[in-house]
Image (spheres, rainbow, N blue to C red):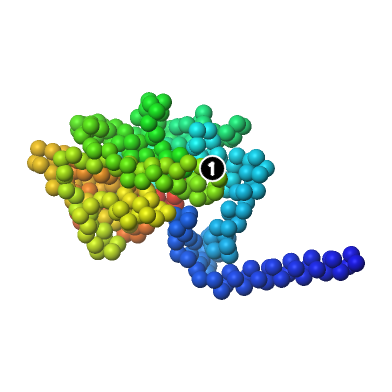
Amino acid sequence: MSKMTDRIYIWGFIGLLFTMSLLFFLLPIQAFSDVENRTLQKAPKLTWDNLWSKTFSDESESYVTDHFPFRNQWVWTKSMLEQLRLQQENNGIYKGKDGYLFEKLSAPAYAEIKEYAAAVQLYAQNHPNANMTFMLAPTSIGLYPERLPWLAEAYPQDEVNRFIGEQVQGSMTFMDGFDFLRSAASSGKPIYYKTDHHWTTYGAYLAYAAYAKEMGWTPAAESDFAVETMTDSFLGSYHTRSQFSGVRPDSIEAYKDKNGIQTEMYIADTDQTVNSMYDPRYLAKKDKYSYFLGGVHALMTLHSKLPANQVELDKMLVIKDSYAHSFLPFLTQHVQDIHVIDIRYYNGSISDYMAENGIEDVLMLFNTTTFIGERNLLKLKY
């Protein structure tokens, strides 16, 4: 009887492996996950360079993980089991106090951070006449450590920001987000979404006000905007990854200019021009944060019809991650033409682009988590 049971287990296991392998190759390959709101790993390219640098093995592992059959259902099942065990962490996300979810932060690889910071420095040194500012925004775990669950481990993010600032400060103006966000953390107004990795529109406004002052401009007051709640059913990336139950959705607000300044957005990726910085179609989708700017674009420009006495700069370049999406509408209050590059997807030479467009003012805006793990920052060297 025991031999028969052993055979059932063995053949059952082999059958499961065979079935999952078959499904892996038969099911259609997705390029983007609507549930996780991210681009999935593409099939790795087998080259000698990739084999030697271990890039092929790393990308192969990511590819299998991203395209594993029924991956979303497995993540949900694991989350339910973890919650039954009264665990406060799942898939790298903590379930904190006051409804906040946080991405787990471990000690970063400082050697890699130095490499990325060196690329930023070299970029600045290659443009000695340019006015460059680097803004580094903390994420919610850095600003609200007191809301972490009991005994949760979190590396101090302010130390990471301080280290990055020390690396780049000599070649440009460095703005540490802790300096202008901490004072508002206890105001009662949410600076970060509870279920997502982005700052709220209010958090973006605080960043804009700090940048405007750094540039010598007078920032628009909050009262200059009509604040509209666009949705109150936003469950963001942290909820998607963790699948914790009983989480209340966030609200997304838009600060609309009361003076009715018109901004035209040109998306180079699709050679498309639209007359708004907002895309309401996304409010009915999972990725509601893409309401701002219509999501991620490698290259775009914002042209605003400003009164002559309101123009602080004719043009500037913003090199950014998605934290800039809710920040950029505020910047249109001062700058006529804003060129925007997402370094994760833009593959041209940024230096050439600056020269071709006569750009001398640059803002680099990243959140800490993106900066410490984004190898595309090395593109700044070229």
Q: Secondary structure at mark 1?
A: loop
Q: Position of residue 312 (x, y in %)?
A: 16, 39
The answer to whether residue 342 is above or below residue 117 is below
Q: Position of residue 199 (x, y in %)?
A: 39, 40
On the rendered image, what quadrant is the C terminus found in?
bottom left
Report whether residue 153 is seen.
yes
The answer to whether residue 318 is above or below residue 2 is above
Asked where in the image residue 132 lies, by quadrant, the reply is top left
Asked where in the image residue 179 lies, by quadrant, the reply is top left
In this view, the residue in front, 291 or 177, is: 291
| Residue drawn where x is 60% and y is 49% of the image | 79
Report whether residue 110 is seen.
no
- Furthest-left residue in view? 308
In this view, the residue in front, 164 or 23, is: 23
| Residue drawn where x is 66% and y is 44% of the image | 84
| Residue type (three-letter) at the residue carrying disc 1 | Gly
* Picture mark count: 1
On the rendered image, what quadrant is the N terminus found in?
bottom right
Q: Is residue 20 left or right of residue 169?
A: right
Asked where in the image residue 64 lies, by quadrant, the reply is bottom right
| Residue drawn where x is 29% and y is 62% of the image | 269
Q: Position of residue 363 (x, y in %)?
A: 29, 43
| Residue drawn where x is 16% and y is 45% of the image | 261
Q: Which residue is mark 1?
A: 246
Q: Position of residue 228 (x, y in %)?
A: 29, 41
